[in-house]
Amino acid sequence: MNDKVVLIVGATSMIGRACAHLFSQQGMKLMLVAQDKNKLDNLVKELTAQVESCIADICVEADVKSIISKTIKSFQRIDGVMQNVAVYPWKPIDELELIDWISY
């Protein structure tokens, strides 16, 4: 898993935070996304891997585009996404449309 680029949404709370630490220890490159800047800044300081962060709300289309752009600009790719917030339309991922996310 070394050098894989993982985007973690909801990075500052329980499971997201634990995964950020675990993934960092495994040498993954991380883009951490959350809404609380102070918590996000503190988490970034705790990690040893190459880490970038982004304040965003995944229910806002412009924020989602910004997250993706910033991740690609920083790491040139995204290998995996850990979606760890309480917003998830229960459909197969290949059937999701933008309206499915906005309705939350």
Image (cartoon, rainbow, N blue to C red):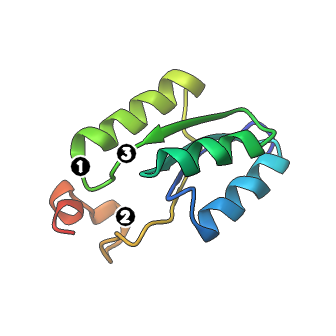
Give the image location of residue 67, x and y in percent: 41, 38
The disc, 2 or 3, on the residue closer to the chain's N-terminal end is 3
Q: Which mark is residue 93?
A: 2
Q: Neighbour class for label 1 at 10 Å: few (<14), some, many (≥20)?
A: few
Regarding mark 2 in the picture, which secondary structure is present there?
Answer: helix
Are there few (<14), some (14-19), or many (20+) residues within 10 Å of tag 3?
many
x 35%, y 33%: residue: 66
Residue 12, given in percent of the width and then of the height, sits at 57, 57
- Using the image, determine if residue 74 lies above or below residue 30: above
Residue 4 is labelled as none
Q: Label 2: few (<14), some or many (≥20) within 10 Å?
A: few
Q: Position of residue 30 (x, y in %)?
A: 64, 41
Disc 3 marks which residue?
A: 56
Question: In the displayed structure, does residue 62 sit left or right of residue 5?
Answer: left
Q: Is residue 88 left or right of residue 82?
A: left
Instruction: Describe residue 37's horizontal placement relative to residue 97 as left or right.
Output: right
